[in-house]
Image (spheres, helix red, strand yellow):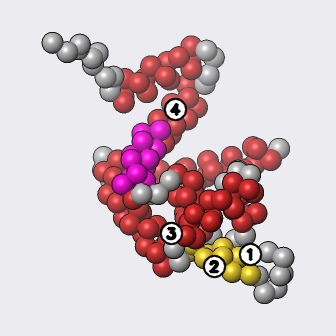
């Protein structure tokens, strides 16, 4: 007879317990409800994303590079140093990561014609295809997460979160 595992608490029960603890410790209820909800959603989605990366045979570090390159404005230049800074890793670690990704055909490194001392890193078509597949698969799950909200509620939520992000920059810069 196998040992019985205790029942897993629902996401709602975990959220409510976390909020209650933060309020009991002196946190503002409204603030804790929002931040705990965003953190909980991020935590659960991260579990899905990590499993998805395994299915795509890409590491979290490689995904960081792929997504950074795919979302960088077209007029911006990505270098190994700028990628290392953006992903908060040592330049030597980035060089090793880019070597592996180049071998797999996901990125291309070319000399910068304006500055011969640096390399420019871009996604290859295979790298872009990896990004596209991941986003399409994620979109299904993300849409399911938001299924309880109608279109107007989704728009309002997006607007509010965008304002919070803008406020985050201001708060961290002061």
Q: x and y percent of residue 52 in the render?
A: 38, 52
Q: Earlier in the sequence, mark 1 or mark 2?
A: 2
Label 3 sits on residue: 104
In three-dimensional space, the C-alpha distance between marks 2 and 3, rounded to whole angstroms, equals 23 Å
Q: Residues within 10 Å of mark 4 (few under 14, many from 20)?
A: some
Q: Earlier in the sequence, mark 4 or mark 2?
A: 4
Q: x and y percent of residue 2 in the render?
A: 20, 15
Q: Which residues are magenta?
A: 43-55
Q: Nearer the viewer, residue 42 or 17?
A: 42
Q: Is residue 55 above or below residue 81?
A: above
Question: Could you tell me if the residues under marks 2 and 3 are in contact, i.e. CB atoms within 8 Å?
Answer: no
Question: Could you tell me if the residues under marks 1 and 2 are in contact, i.e. CB atoms within 8 Å?
Answer: no
Q: Which mark is residue 119?
A: 1
**Residue 139 in sight here:** no
Quarter of the N terminus within the rendering = top left
Q: Which mark is residue 36?
A: 4
Label 2 sits on residue: 74
Q: Magenta segment, principal secondary structure?
A: helix
Q: Earlier in the sequence, mark 2 or mark 3?
A: 2
Question: Could you tell me if the residues under marks 1 and 4 are in contact, i.e. CB atoms within 8 Å?
Answer: no
Circle 3 sits in a helix, a strand or a loop, which is it?
A: loop
């Amino acid at each position: 007879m196998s040992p019985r595992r205790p029942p897993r608490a629902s996401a709602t029960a975990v959220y409510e317990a976390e909020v209650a603890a933060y309020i009991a410790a002196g946190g503002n209820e409204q603030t804790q409800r929002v931040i705990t909800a965003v953190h909980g959603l991020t935590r659960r989605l991260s579990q899905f994303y990590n499993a998805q990366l395994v299915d795509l045979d890409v590491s979290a570090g490689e995904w960081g590079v792929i997504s950074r390159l795919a979302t960088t404005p077209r007029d911006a230049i990505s270098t190994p140093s700028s990628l290392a800074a953006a992903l908060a890793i040592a330049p030597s670690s980035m060089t090793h990561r880019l070597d592996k990704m180049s071998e797999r055909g996901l990125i291309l490194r070319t000399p910068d014609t304006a500055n011969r001392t640096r390399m420019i890193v871009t996604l290859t078509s295979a790298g872009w295809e990896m990004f596209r597949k991941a986003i399409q698969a994620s979109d299904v799950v993300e849409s399911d997460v938001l299924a309880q909200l109608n279109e107007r509620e989704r728009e309002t939520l997006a607007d509010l979160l965008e304002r919070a992000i803008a406020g985050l920059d201001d708060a961290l810069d002061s």
